[in-house]
């Protein structure tokens, strides 16, 4: 036998011959965050999200996933660190924002250490590196807005993601955080979605197109000077739905192309939201101000090799559970700091217990903390008041049972106090220094009202 043949046989035995394109040893990770997408907008009942629903059928849909904060910065920081806002330190209010605490490890560091290339495509001020959430990515492609009207839309965001993925070498897995901002106010869906979900006449009538969630409206709203009529909110919600459908179509295009690039077989896909949106569910509008479910119940689906197709999980899970799941799924070493727990047993169809879920860290209004456990939910507010809801039966949180079931209230308060005292609190994150231009930009986006 010739030496060359011997060598070829030896390589063949090692799987090095006859392998057309070397696949990365580890799967890629594509983590999609659709900003402000309410959990109840998905599904066939409303018919707004056929592409996301189809994606969900290829993997596992978590019907009761809860974010750890009702607005972008602390919520996505919780996802990227598997910690509660009080632990990672990111949050705050306008002019006094805090970044993720410096001593904390974030998801891209964990994956870079395991040989991944890391990249973030994000569309909001709070995901700039200075806020800490994306500081450890090798590259951050951020299109922060001058105001919420001019944003990098879903089409351009999808294009950026496709361009990035097309450039990646098959020898090195990637970890891509992909953030869509269209569903966030201002709601201004492009055609044909605008016509499909909200009748167009008001766009043509009057001095300009009708927008909802403009700076002026947000300022007036937070100052209590904007009347939120049912008609106004109904109209806003329809335009919001148009944005949801538009973003869905772009995610559909992304998935189609991903399949065409041969990436679907070797990519772990997370699709989720950072928080929801209120349309008078509890008398308010927008997000960041309460911890009711319209703001913290978020869509979550995990799709990829090993996740059982078509599975729906009714148990309560938390967004801090996603990062530990990805680590286990991709066989990447996790961090001791993780407060969440892997969801792999659910992905493999083994089931598991509901997890108690905590949320806090609102951006405006009095502070609130929510604890959900065993079909019940406690809300403690900064003014000393408490609410108790039997969410297993009262999903819309309409009937406050705090004065009727005082024992349960007290038990949940004790439980919350125990959880909070066990948190490894490092204190507030570092103050984020804003330039006057950035401050103006945030104010112009409606983040200045009511302060
Ligand atoms: Zn957000």
Image (tube, rainbow, N blue to C red):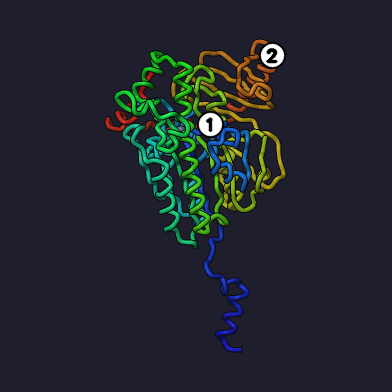
Q: Quadrant of residue 204?
A: top left
Question: In x, y percent, where is residue 243?
Answer: 45, 35
Residue at the bottom extreme, as displayed = 1
Please rate how many residues cluster around mark 2, counting C-alpha atoms within 10 Å: few if below 14, some from 14 to 19, many from 20: few
Question: In x, y percent, where is residue 422?
Answer: 59, 30
> Against 376, is 243 above or below?
below
Please rate how many residues cluster around mark 1, counting C-alpha atoms within 10 Å: few if below 14, some from 14 to 19, many from 20: many
For residue 341, say whether it is visible: yes
The residue that label 2 is drawn on is 405
Q: Quadrant of residue 151?
A: top left
Is 52 on the left or on the right of 407, as rendered?
A: left
Mark drawn on residue 179:
none
What number of labels is visible?
2
The residue that label 1 is drawn on is 38
Q: Would you say the beta carbon of the disc 1 residue lies within 8 angstroms of ligand 1? A: no
Is 343 on the left or on the right of 280, as rendered?
A: right
> Against 51, is 85 above or below?
above
* Mark 1, secondary structure of its residue: loop
Mark 1 or mark 2, which is nearer the start of the sequence? 1
Question: In x, y percent, where is residue 355?
Answer: 65, 33
User: Residue drawn at (40%, 15%), measured in percent from left and top?
Assistant: 226
* Mark 2, secondary structure of its residue: loop
Question: Which quadrant of the figure contains the C terminus?
Answer: top left
Question: Which quadrant of the figure contains the N terminus?
Answer: bottom right
For residue 424, say whether it is visible: no
């Amino acid at each position: 036998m010739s030496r060359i043949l011997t060598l070829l046989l030896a390589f063949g035995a090692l799987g090095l011959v006859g392998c057309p394109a070397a696949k990365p040893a580890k799967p890629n990770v594509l983590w999609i965050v659709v900003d402000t997408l309410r959990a109840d907008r998905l599904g066939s009942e409303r018919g707004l999200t056929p592409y996301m629903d189809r994606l969900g059928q290829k993997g596992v849909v978590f019907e009761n996933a809860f974010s750890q904060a009702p607005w972008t910065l602390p919520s996505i920081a919780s996802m990227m660190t598997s910690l509660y806002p009080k632990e990672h330190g990111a949050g705050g209010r306008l002019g006094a924002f805090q970044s993720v605490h410096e001593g904390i490890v974030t998801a891209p560091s964990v994956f870079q250490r395991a040989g991944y290339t890391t990249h973030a495509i994000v569309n909001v001020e709070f995901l700039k590196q200075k806020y800490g959430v994306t500081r450890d990515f090798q590259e951050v492609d951020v299109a922060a807005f001058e105001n919420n009207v001019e944003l990098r839309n879903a089409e351009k965001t999808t294009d950026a993601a496709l361009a990035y993925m097309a450039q990646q070498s098959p020898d090195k897995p990637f970890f891509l955080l992909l953030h869509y901002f269209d569903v966030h106010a201002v709601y201004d869906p492009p055609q044909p979605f605008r016509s499909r979900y909200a009748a167009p006449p008001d766009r043509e009538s009057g001095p300009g197109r009708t927008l909802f969630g403009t700076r002026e409206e947000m300022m007036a709203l937070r100052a209590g000077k904007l009347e939120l009529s049912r008609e106004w909110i109904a109209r806003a919600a329809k335009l919001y739905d148009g944005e949801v459908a538009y973003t869905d179509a772009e995610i559909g295009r992304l998935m189609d192309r991903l399949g065409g690039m041969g990436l679907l077989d070797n990519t772990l896909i997370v699709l989720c939201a950072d928080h929801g949106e209120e349309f008078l569910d509890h008398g308010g509008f927008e997000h960041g101000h309460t911890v009711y479910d319209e703001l913290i119940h978020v869509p979550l689906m995990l799709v990829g090799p090993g996740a059982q197709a078509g599975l729906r999980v009714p148990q309560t899970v938390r967004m801090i559970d996603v990062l530990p799941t990805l680590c286990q799924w991709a066989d990447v070493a996790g961090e001791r700091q993780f407060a969440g727990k892997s969801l792999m047993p659910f992905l493999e169809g083994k089931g598991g217990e509901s997890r108690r879920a905590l949320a806090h860290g609102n951006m405006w209004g009095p502070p609130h903390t929510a604890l959900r456990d065993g079909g019940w939910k406690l809300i403690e507010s900064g003014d000393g008041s408490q609410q108790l809801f039997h969410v297993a039966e009262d999903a819309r949180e309409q009937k406050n049972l705090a004065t009727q079931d005082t024992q349960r209230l007290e038990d949940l308060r004790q439980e919350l106090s125990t959880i909070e005292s066990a948190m490894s609190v490092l204190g507030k994150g570092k103050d984020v220094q804003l330039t006057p231009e950035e401050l103006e930009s945030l104010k112009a986006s409606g983040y200045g009202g009511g302060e």
